[in-house]
Amino acid sequence: MSNPVVSVLMPAFNVEKYISLAIYSILGQTFSDFELVIFNDGSTDRTGEIIRQFNDPRIVLLDSQENIGLVKARNILVSKARGRYIAFLDADDIAMPHRLQIQTAFLELNQVDICGGAYRSLYEVTGKMKASKQRYTDADIRALLTIASPLCNPAVMGKAAIFKKFPYRSGKNYAEDYSLWIEMALAGYRFANLKENLITYRIHAAQTSQTQNAETSIIFSESREGYLLGLGISSKLTPITMPVASRLKMAIPFMLQLNQKIPGISVMANYEIYARFQYRANGLLSPFTRLERLLVSMYASIRGLV
């Protein structure tokens, strides 16, 4: 049997409430040359039973008798993937029917190596939906890695060979995807986000990303500092809130260095980054801080093209 074009990887732990919709959303894709590899990570509810109710040869079920955690589960899934491309979907999220088709077509152009996209967040408590605010170019994504993760992990598809070369790092719990994008960025791989909505990203109390703590914040901070050093920028310039005098001394030089290291950063991406240097809720001063942010962002973008 020939290998599929895409391997969709789905870790699952105690998600009996959600996993049926996640599986259906993949089986109903307009692109059909895929395998869906599910890792049942020692679930103690009906997750395994629900998965086994699906009778589709494209589903590959990996069962663990004990819970080994998300990072190890993701790495096992990557090691078992047979496709040319790997796509992620968490067991509590929903893929749009065209997702695999448009991401595969885009990656086949060989203009990028890792491809994310727009998504909608579904807040389970209120039922409200919120559209994501993405940046789409490689330069913007690389730049935004200095402050946060500009890729939504369960909406990502990329070349399988890269994921097999760069495993998720143990000890990076709740920041494992962010740390991975940084490694790939420093290795020179190319990123993009598509403007099409690819998934519905469910937000609920039991979700792993809702249990972040102080330890996770430390992991994020260490990863950010490592990224700056990898770019050749002092980690002392890490974007944090500071008074105006300090911003003139540290923030503006940081913005200029960043735009020289990564040419082509948009004004709006620079605007998001510079905001991290400013205090929020400035009251009457807000118009002035926004103006400062805009002027610095425009200046940095222009200097980055020189």
Image: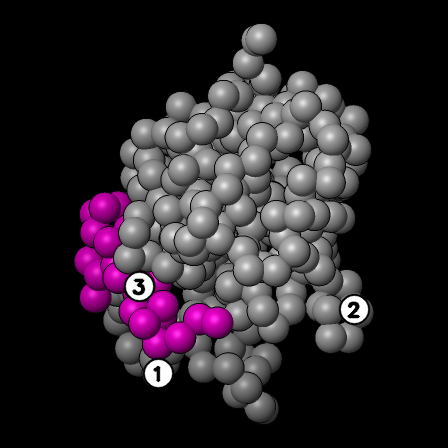
Q: Tell me the magenta residue range.
A: 211-236
Which comes sooner in the sequence, label 3 or label 1? 3
Q: Magenta part mainly helix, strand or loop?
A: helix
Density class for disc 3 (Cα within 10 Å; few <14, some 14-19, many ≥20) is some
Q: Amino acid at mark 3?
A: Ile
- Label number found at residue 219: 3
Where in the figure is residue 53, as x and y percent of width and height? 73, 40
Marks 3 and 1 sit apart, C-alpha to C-alpha, by: 26 Å
Residue to which mark 2 is pinned: 128
* Label 2 residue SS: loop
Residue at figure coordinates x 53%, y 21% from the top left = 83
Which comes sooner in the sequence, label 2 or label 3? 2
Image coloring type: one colour
On the rendered structure, is 156 left or right of 145?
Answer: right
Q: Examine the rendering and report whether any part of residue 44 can be seen.
A: yes
* Label 3 residue SS: helix
Residue to which mark 1 is pinned: 243
Residue farthest to the top? 1
* Label 1 residue SS: loop
Density class for disc 1 (Cα within 10 Å; few <14, some 14-19, many ≥20) is few
Which comes sooner in the sequence, label 1 or label 2? 2
34 or 121, nearer to the observer:
34
